[in-house]
Amino acid sequence: MKKTLTVYASEHDAMVANIDALDAKPPMRRFIGRQYNAELGEAGGWEKKLEPETIPCYNDYIKAIKDGDLIPADEQTAKICGVPWARKQKDSK
């Protein structure tokens, strides 16, 4: 079984490209943890998804997590990436 990572987009404006979408035929523009909204601005924009996204365990994504461009959504993802894990505020009671 392949390892996966479960992440959120960061709170800042980083946009991590979906590598598999770029390799698709034809290539598609997709960003991890973000979805396109045509109503944002004149040309649309990429808003943050509210739900976590499960992605393959690629080195580029691990680096994005270590750099703070993606946020681990679970303890396993944080452990794989060697970063601290803090439960999202909406999940903590």
Image (cartoon, rainbow, N blue to C red):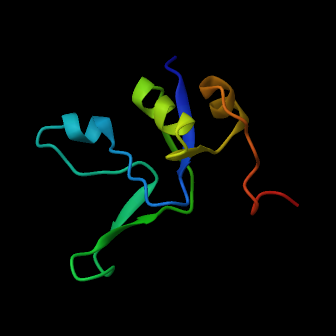
Position of residue 2 relative to residue 51, above or below, is above
Which residue ends up furthest to the right in the rendered image? 93
Give x and y (percent) for residue 61.
45, 33
- The residue depicted at 72 percent of the width and 55 percent of the height is 88
Give x and y (percent) for residue 57.
48, 26
- The residue depicted at 55 percent of the width and 60 percent of the height is 11
- The residue depicted at 75 percent of the width and 63 percent of the height is 90
Residue 38 falls in image quadrant: bottom left
Q: Is residue 55 left or right of residue 68?
A: left
Q: Is residue 4 left or right of residue 86?
A: left
Q: Is residue 39 left or right of residue 52?
A: left
The mark total stands at 0
- The residue depicted at 52 percent of the width and 39 percent of the height is 67
Which residue ends up furthest to the top in the rendered image? 1
Q: Is residue 58 left or right of residue 52?
A: left
Quarter of the image with the C terminus is: bottom right
Which residue ends up furthest to the left in the rendered image? 26
Q: Observer-nearest residue: 90 or 68?
A: 68
Give x and y (percent) for residue 87.
76, 49
Q: Observer-nearest residue: 16 or 92?
A: 16
Which residue ends up furthest to the front in the rendered image? 67
Give x and y (percent) for residue 65.
54, 38
